[in-house]
Amino acid sequence: MITFDDLQSLKAALGYDANPKLILGGGSNILFTKDFEGTVLKNEIKGISIVETTENQVIVEVGAGEIWHSFVQYCISQNWGGVENLSLIPGTCGAAPIQNIGAYGVELKDILASVTCYSTETKESNDS
């Protein structure tokens, strides 16, 4: 098992060996029924930063390894409305767009501005 906390350490982890890779966020939806014959990579990319603030909105950049509920709690502590209905959903912020999480009339697709991705096949990022 290898943890990574930024793009460079992810690239290094991906090149560590030729074994198959399994990338985990929080791992809350994974149940191993037998040994995994490969390398498990654990996403620990953290950080919450304000990108832009206007009178009506705040655009925030969040690391994919941040725990989703912790992010929601952070937003609530800043008095930012919009994600509070999505509290207590397990997983990481990086998994949230894939799952398009939603609860009580709020869906992530309605509040998500963009996602930065890295392709393990092409070795390219959509922000490079």
Image (cartoon, rainbow, N blue to C red):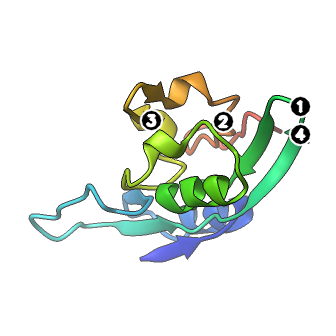
**Picture layout, residue 112 above or below residue 52:** above
Tell me which amino acid carries mark 4.
Glu
Quick one: label 2 or label 1, which is nearer the N terminus? 1
- The residue under label 4 is 52
Tell me which amino acid carries mark 1.
Glu
Q: Residues within 10 Å of mark 3 (few under 14, many from 20)?
A: few
- The residue under label 3 is 98
Give the quadrant of the N terminus. bottom left
Residue 122: x %, y % from top left: 63, 37
In this rendering, the label closer to the viewer, 2 or 4: 4
Name the foreground residue: 64 vs 8: 64
Tell me how far mark 2 sits from mark 4, CA to CA: 15 Å
**Picture layout, residue 23 above or below residue 44:** above
Tell me how far mark 2 sits from mark 1, CA to CA: 23 Å
Residue at 66% x, 44% y: name it: 123
Residue at 47% x, 68% y: name it: 42
In this rendering, the label closer to the viewer, 2 or 1: 1
Q: Number of callouts in the render?
A: 4
